[in-house]
Amino acid sequence: MRFSDGMWQVRPGFTLEAPACSYAGHTDARSITLYGPYHPVTHRGMTLNCGQMTITLSAPAEGVISVRMENFMGACKKGPDFVLNTTDCGVVETDGDRAVLRSGKLTAETSINGEWGIRFYWDGRLLTETGFRGMAHLYGPDGTTYMREQLSLDVAEQIVGLGERFGPFVKNGQSVDLVNADGGTNSEQAYKNIPFYLSTKGYGLFVNTPAEVSYEIGSEIVNRVQFSVPGESMEYMVIGGDDYKEVITNYTGLTGRPPMLPAWTFGLWLSTSFTTNYDEETVLSFIDGMLERKIPLTVFHFDCFWMKEFQWTDFVWNEDTFKDPEGMLKKIHDRGIKVCCWINPYIAQKSRLFKEGLEHDYFVKTGDGSVWQWDMWQAGMALVDFTNPEAVKWYQGYLRQLCEMGVDAFKTDFGERIPVQDPYYGPKAAKYGIVYHDGSDPDKMHNYYTYLYNKAVYDLLEEVYGKEKACLFARSATAGGQQFPVHWGGDNLPNYPSMAQSLRGGMSLALCGFGYWSHDIGGFEGQSDYDIFKRWTQFGLLSSHSRYHGSNAYKVPWMYGEEAVEVTRAFTKLKMRLMPYLYQMSVEAHTKGIPMMRPMLLEFPDDRTAPFADTQYMLGDSILVAPIMNPNNIGEYYLPEGLWTDWFTGETVQGGGWHKGEYDYFTLPLFVRENTILVLGSHDDRPDYDYEENPEIRIFGLRDGATASADVVSQTGEHKFTITATRSGKTVTVHIEGEHGKIRIGIAGGMLMEPSGNDFSISSNLLK
């Protein structure tokens, strides 16, 4: 939201109050309290008739400093609030009027009595600062009040993140409002809005509120990042780290990290699609069609119409098309396939659950005591109130019945169209407001609702199947939602611009601690052409999670030509072979919050081009993927400095610039980073197998004098063995430590050997 009129003035209708000095602040052992009068105080009389801001600096975790800004501290403070993992760990040092708060290597330096400003340092290096007219309290023309902060934006500094954003990956010059919305993937709206950004100066910034946060990123004041919220207070947290990865690790230490996912989730998912006609015969024909064509299939998904129209959500199989759902689910399981079912948090008036929810007050209400209802999506639908513990148990009870029937996972659709006091959500909402069971602020609940919704479903799956065996497929999210994976990118289109939008959205989300991500292969809306289907298949099967899905078109490969079948088979089998590597990357997502799919700057923080190479990504720390996004078979990609090995040809390329080449449908720019050991699994027909059993080990681009290593874990994340290789001249010395079966090992695309013992050497002319 913009408040300024050029450098000096405020926009008409707004009144701005900003700390002019620091006056009579104080410290204790772990925090600093500043008082910022809204005009200079040069004598005692100037303390009269003057507002002031109270600012509290504290350290909620090591490497994190919180700044809490308050105008009127007595303003009503309603939840919900993000659930954070905090430990008061700050150390305060003073020297006269100068005060320093230390949190590990992160420090905040300020004056408790004198010139106004706060500077943030990591290990002595300036990250950012706030000063003259940065912090502010504003009155708007309609009486609404706002809290605003502006942090310095340095020359060549880029800002990235803020959740799922489908525009340019670098956010400089953009205005961004964090409001969850069901707007598809080609607009400024997003399903997953996260008030966390990452700066290339080496810090993260988290605004600790689920309310709408509005950002002006070098757009209003070109050398500042501005963020604001409605109300009388705002808290933000500066998060440091030795590199971008440590910043994300520290951020997810606060907001939660992704769990380990069962290995089967990394296989190929196939959907009925949305409005297509399907019954048991159709479903089994799709599954058998995949198996007969030797395309490894892991999960089959039933979209909305597994339930009867006008009755969503009632959790009852449509008896007109599914005469024996339990029998059908058994047939699917007998084929080795898991089952996922679509659900949402809305209860239509025709649903069998509507009267139950009405009777027990399980729905969100309006201020006159009525249940909030509207006709968007389903006629007369109400919204389950997940702030009511009894409503949560009620909703979970029906999910448990489906699990007992044979459902393995749920697709938690929607969660964005959550009402606030606005005419869009109906006259009663506009007139009387929205009321939650626990008294939560409806404006904050708009973005936060998805957290409660997905948590309720994920908790049920963990209860039924146990930890590390639960999985859902979610569209909406807020901060902390990474704890309930997987998330997919929403309603995209079957064209190349939408493919790029989806990737940018996923990579922006990844920087906010979301370790896993997927997207609708081939585009959701409309029919894919043969070209798009095959290119998107490559991209989809080189993502952490892979799902064919559509709106009004089936997405089974043979409907897109025989070559599409072959492409699907080839890239599904490739992903299955990569599972030892991918699963080790999922361990890193779980333990450190580092995403499996990584924007280029995450692996190459010193490369100034990396933030702008936003149509490619690193799959884990070692594999570069550049999906082809044009109908001309041309791959354009950026290789950072170093030696890169083409996965398909084994040829090496020196990085440090942009490249272009022509690729058929069985290839794309897929490169392995130098000094990499990749462990390939012994199976290409399924994702859940023993990764330490008879693996194939490939050494890529090992530099003379360099050492590389790789870990292999089991399906439960248990460490099995580590392989280490050191090169000297044309010889590589290898050491293996831990449990493993028979192995084969080789240099890049060269011959494989079967060594005996855990210590051996390889000599090869392929070493460059």
Image: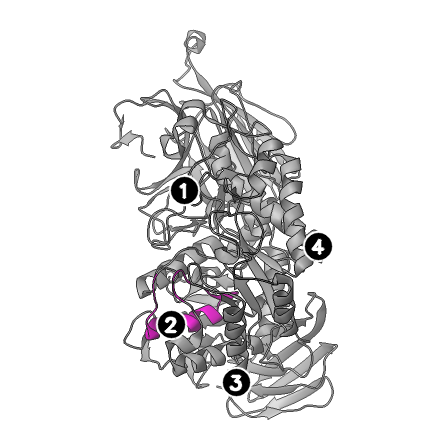
For label 3, the SS is loop
Mark 4 vs 1, N-terminal side: 1
For label 4, the SS is helix
The location of residue 503, given as percent across then percent down, is 41, 61
Q: Which residues are magenta?
A: 526-553
Q: Amino acid at mark 3?
A: Ala
Mark 2 vs mark 3, foreground winner is 2
The answer to whether residue 339 of the structure is visible from this angle is: yes
Residue 722 higher or lower than 31, as above or below: below
- Provide the residue designation for mark 2: 533
For label 2, the SS is helix
**For the image shown, how many numbered marks are present on the structure?**
4
- Circles 4 and 1, Cβ within 8 Å, touching? The answer is no
- Which label sits on residue 464? 4
Q: Is 249 left or right of 222, judged from the image as shown?
A: right
The location of residue 157, given as percent across then percent down, is 38, 50
| Crowd around label 3: few <14 · some 14–19 · many ≥20 (10 Å) | many
- Circles 2 and 3, Cβ within 8 Å, touching? The answer is no
- Provide the residue designation for mark 1: 376
Q: Residue at x 29, y 73 (%)?
A: 631
State how the image is colored. Answer: one colour
Mark 2 vs 3, N-terminal side: 2
Rounded to the nearest angstrom, the CA distance separating label 1 from label 3 is: 55 Å
Rounded to the nearest angstrom, the CA distance separating label 2 from label 1 is: 31 Å
